[in-house]
Image (cartoon, rainbow, N blue to C red):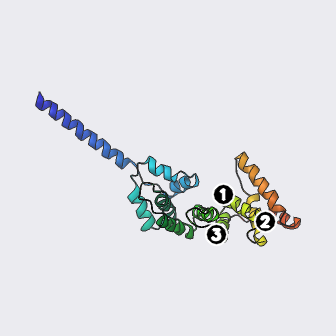
Amino acid sequence: MRILLIFLLSLCYVCSAQAFQSNLQAVQIYTDDQLLDLIKENKHLSQVVLDECQLVQDIEARAIKASMPSYQFLWGDMLAYGVCVKKDISLGLHYMKLAADQGLAEGLEQMGRYYHIGKFMQIDIDKAIVYLKTAASLNNLAAQMRLAKIYQKGYGSPLDYPALYSQLHHAVTDDKKLHKEISLLLKELATKMPEKVVIAAKRTDYTN
C-alpha cells in the first residue's frame, strides 16, 4: 500500500511538472504586427508581465541580434523601467533611439516626448521638435498634437505650420474628447497663418 501511494505521488509530481513545462512553452513570441499593436495601445510592457517574463531572452535577441525596431523599442522600455530585467535607463534610451532611427513612429514620438518633458534627460525643445516632426509625418497623432502645443508656445518654424495643420486636419479618430482637442489645436494654429495658407493646408494632404 505504501509503495502504491509513493508511486501515485510520484506520478502526480511528473504530471504537474509536465503541465508546468507545457504552460511555459505555450507562450509564443509576438509577431511584429502583434507587438506593434501592443505598442500603439501602450500595452507592450504589461503584456510582458502578463506572460510572466518568459520571453525576455527572445525579446533581447530580436532587439540586439535581429535589430527589429519594434523589439528595440520594447527592450528599451523594459530596461528603462526595469520590467523583467535589471533597470538600466541609459541602455534603455539607447535602444529606444535605435528604434526611432529606424523610423518607428512610436519610438520617434517617445523620444520627442521625453526631450519635451525632460523624462530621463534634460529638456531640449529643438531635439523634441526634430523627433516629433518625423513622427507626425508618419501619422502619429500623439506627436502631431504635442507638436501643435509646442508651436503654440512660439517654438519651431512658421514654415512648418501648414504641414502640421494639414496632418491634424486629416487626422481620424472616433474619440470625441480627442476630436474636440484637435479642433481647438487647429483653431489656435490657424491664427498663426494667413487665411489663404490655412485654406491651402486643408486641401493638401501631408500624410503618407
Q: Earlier in the sequence, mark 3 or mark 1?
A: 3
Residue at 55% x, 53% y: name it: 37
Q: Amino acid at mark 1?
A: Ala
Q: Is residue 25 left or right of residue 191?
A: left
Tell me the quarter of the image containing the N terminus: top left
Residue extending farthest to the top is 1
Three-letter code for the amino acid on which mark 2 is drawn: Thr
Relative to 25, is 155 on the left or the right? right
Rendered location of residue 67, percent (x, y): 47, 68
Could you say where residue 126 lies in the image, as x and y percent from the top left? Answer: 67, 71
**Nearer the observer, disc 3 or disc 1?**
3
Residue 90 visible here: yes
Q: Nearer the viewer, residue 143 or 197?
A: 143
Disc nearer the start of the sequence (1/2): 1
Q: Residues within 10 Å of mark 1 (few under 14, many from 20)?
A: some
Is residue 6 depicted above or below 114 in this figure?
above
Q: Quadrant of residue 159?
A: bottom right
Q: Which mark is residue 204?
A: 2
Q: Which of these two is toward me, 21 or 158?
A: 158
- The quadrant of the rendering that contains the C terminus is bottom right
Q: Farthest residue toward the right?
A: 195
In this view of the protein, can residue 205 be seen by the observer?
no
Residue 207's x, y, as percent?
Answer: 70, 64
Which residue is labeled 1 in the image?
142
- Disc on res. 124: 3
Q: What's the residue type where badge 3 is placed? A: Asp
